[in-house]
Image: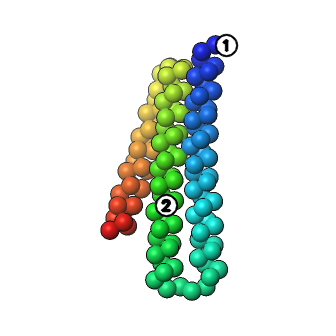
Amino acid sequence: MDVWILVDFVAYAVGTAGMGVIVWGSVRALSGFFLAEFRGRHNSDTTGALERLRLGFGAYLLLGLEFMVAADIIHTIARPDFESLIVLGAIVAIRTVISFFLTREMRISDR
């Protein structure tokens, strides 16, 4: 078996894991949201629950994005060409900015 095929498979698996983490976090956040909404009582408990849901969802997004960045890095190592490096740089820059602002928002909300 060619080693690059194995490396591509690992990159694909890590990227898929990242998508799975984001999907799982989305399902948890949506189910929690619907449960809070259908209870029908909008008070400080509901507000606190929704805030915890938002922070938890942000954590899942950050973790999923980190997995996806790792997959892009692995893939670029496997097939290093100029176009792949430019795409990787753009993806890492965009995901870093998103991660920065998500983390900042989570810290502000955690106070």
Q: Position of residue 21 (x, y in %)?
A: 57, 49
**Residue at (64, 13) in percent of width and height:** 2
Is 105 situated left or right of 51 in this image?
left
Label 1 sits on residue: 1
- Mark 1 vs mark 2: which is more N-terminal? 1
Label 2 sits on residue: 56
Q: Secondary structure at mark 1?
A: loop
Tell me which corner region of the image, top left, top right, bottom left or bottom right, holds residue 1: top right
Check contact, mark 1 vs mark 2: CB within 8 A.
no
Q: In the drawing, what numbered circle is on residue 43?
A: none
Vertical side of 27 occupied by 47: above or below: below
Residue that extends furthest to the right in the rendered view of this protein: 1
Q: Position of residue 40 (x, y in %)?
A: 61, 85
Amino acid type at mark 1: Met
Q: Secondary structure at mark 2?
A: helix
Dot 2 surroundings within 10 Å: few (below 14), some, or many (20 or more)? some
Vertical side of 63 occupied by 58: above or below: below
Tell me which corner region of the image, top left, top right, bottom left or bottom right, holds residue 79: top right
Q: Position of residue 58 (x, y in %)?
A: 48, 57
**Residue at (61, 65) in percent of width and height:** 30
Is 55 situated left or right of 38 in this image?
left
**Residue at (60, 61) in percent of width and height:** 28
Query: Which quadrant of the figure contains the C terminus?
Result: bottom left
**Residue at (51, 72) in percent of width and height:** 50
Amino acid type at mark 2: Gly
- Asked if residue 104 can be seen in this view, the reply is yes
Q: Position of residue 12 (x, y in %)?
A: 61, 32
- Asked if residue 84 can be seen in this view, the reply is no
